[in-house]
Image: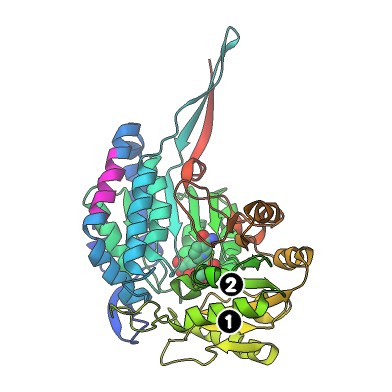
Amino acid sequence: MNSSISNRSADASFNVLNPSTGQIIGQTANMGNEELNIAVESAKSAFPHWSSLTDDELKEKCLAITKKIEDHSEELAKLITLEQGKPLNGLGSRWEVGAAVAWAGYTSNLSIPVKILQDNTDGKVELHRKPLGVIGSITPWNFPILIAIWHVIPALRTGNTVVIKPSPNTPLSTIRLIEIMQEVLPPGVINVVTGDDQEFNLGAAMSAHPDIRKIVFTGSCATGIKVMKTAADSMKRLTLELGGNDAGIVLPDVDPNAIAEGLFWGAFINNGQTCAAMKRLYVHESVYDAVCESLVEFAKKIPVGDGMNESSILGPIQNKAQFDKVSRLISEAKQQGKVLLGGEPGKGLFYPPTIISDLKNGDSLVDEEQFGPVLPIVKYSNIDEAIRLANDSPNGLGGSIWSSNIETAKSIANQLECGSVWINKHGAIQPNAPFGGVKSSGIGVEFSDEGLMEYTDIQVIFS
Ligand code: NAD
């Protein structure tokens, strides 16, 4: 926490639970408006100095943060596992912190030079990018460190100051991340606030705060809509990275065994609790049985257990509300399709990887974002039908085409209504490629130069 806040005792605290065991692993402050105002004021006071640093100075500070995070990798990974549940290994918390370091490093090295639009006898026209001021970052519980980095580093790199609010389910790793950053940054440049979303909604208060100039929000579509409405009164800039219901389409020319591993991780990365995970799979009838069989054979081998156990590759569902949602969708899908794997809850918040075939659009597991360890499979007979079914969703985050013919796959990719399309993989984001949703999956993009520009206003100087 920023020192001005940590010296002050908040009225109450709330518990943070380990989803693998149900045990309390820590408490954090349940803040209200007063604490939020202190944090915003702190960020506002730090802005004039921070935004006056040269491009090289900002870059150096951001690279110094990156190094600090790298030095604390193992500590952060353990905190993520304890509060989020994902295992240390596999595509788990060590992977998440490694990705955070890679993103921070890449983004620190980006810059937005002044663009000369005209330089002739009629005059010179320059396009400048200016920082906005105080950025409010609101993050979800699925990748607490990585998503914080996606919000914070581009904001700082472009000369803004930040107030970040993690999800009440996973606040501890973010608090530690911000403490580490504060060892490098001048006071007030970055601040963290926490609340339990019960009697007082800190995210809503941030969206309404007159001194926050932009909200970068990652979370559900329903909350994103609330943020947009609340932010309208103060004309805030917004980046909204919202929910997805990504479709994968398997063409008849695939080798089912060769794609099984990619299909599995496309759907089950982070136990399916990933915005751009594959959440519906459409398979051509000629390879349907073989693809289902190969996928189930691969999925059976994945060890599920307490994330702190070095041999676990998938962990529990992160929280009870999400567990209940996944349980409901599976119960409904069992009436409509055929359970090929899993289908029954484990202990506590554990649910084994579940694969249910013979479903169709209109079934709740196909239509709703499950955000958990279950994949619905739908059979199709012609590609136009598959494209129509894939596009039959209010969401438009990602999609994938699986084929041995890249050109055919690309021509189908082009017809999908989503921000990213992968061929023979799913969800493989990278820091040099813009990422964002179309339709109800959000507004704006993150990553790359395009993502960096979202933390700036344009000013054109005519001379
Ligand atoms: P959520 O919308 O419930 O919560 C996200 C954040 O919003 C939390 O910090 C929460 O405290 C805060 N919040 C709650 N009410 C608010 C309000 N009225 N105003 C402002 N903020 C408020 O989402 P979640 O359950 O934490 O995360 C899961 C969702 O996030 C899924 O739908 C997933 O697809 C989506 N997600 C999207 C991306 C992406 O990049 N598109 C990435 C990760 C997760």
Image position of 64 with respect to 11: above or below: above
**In the rendered image, which residue does mark 2 sit on?**
256
* Contact flag, marks 2 and 1 (Cβ < 8 Å): yes
**Image colouring:** rainbow
Which of 259/313 is in front? 259
Check disc 1 and give the amino acid type: Glu
Could you say where residue 110 lies in the image, as x and y percent from the top left? 40, 39
Q: Is residue 344 left or right of residue 37?
A: right
Q: Is residue 355 visible?
A: yes
Element type at mark 1: helix
Query: Which residue is found at the position 23% from the left and 48% from the top?
Result: 184
Camera sees residue 38: no
Residue position marked by numbered label 1 in the rendering: 293
| Residue 346 screen position, x and y as percent | 44, 92
The residue stretch that appears in magenta: 60-69
Mark pair 2, 1: CA separation: 8 Å
Query: 421 or 181: nearer the eye?
Result: 421
Is 177 within the magenta?
Answer: no
State which tag comes first along the sequence, 2 or 1.
2
User: Magenta region's main secondary structure?
Assistant: helix
Where is residue 209 drawn, in percent x and y? 48, 55
Local crowd size for mark 1, using a 10 Å CA cut-off: few (<14), some (14–19), many (≥20): some
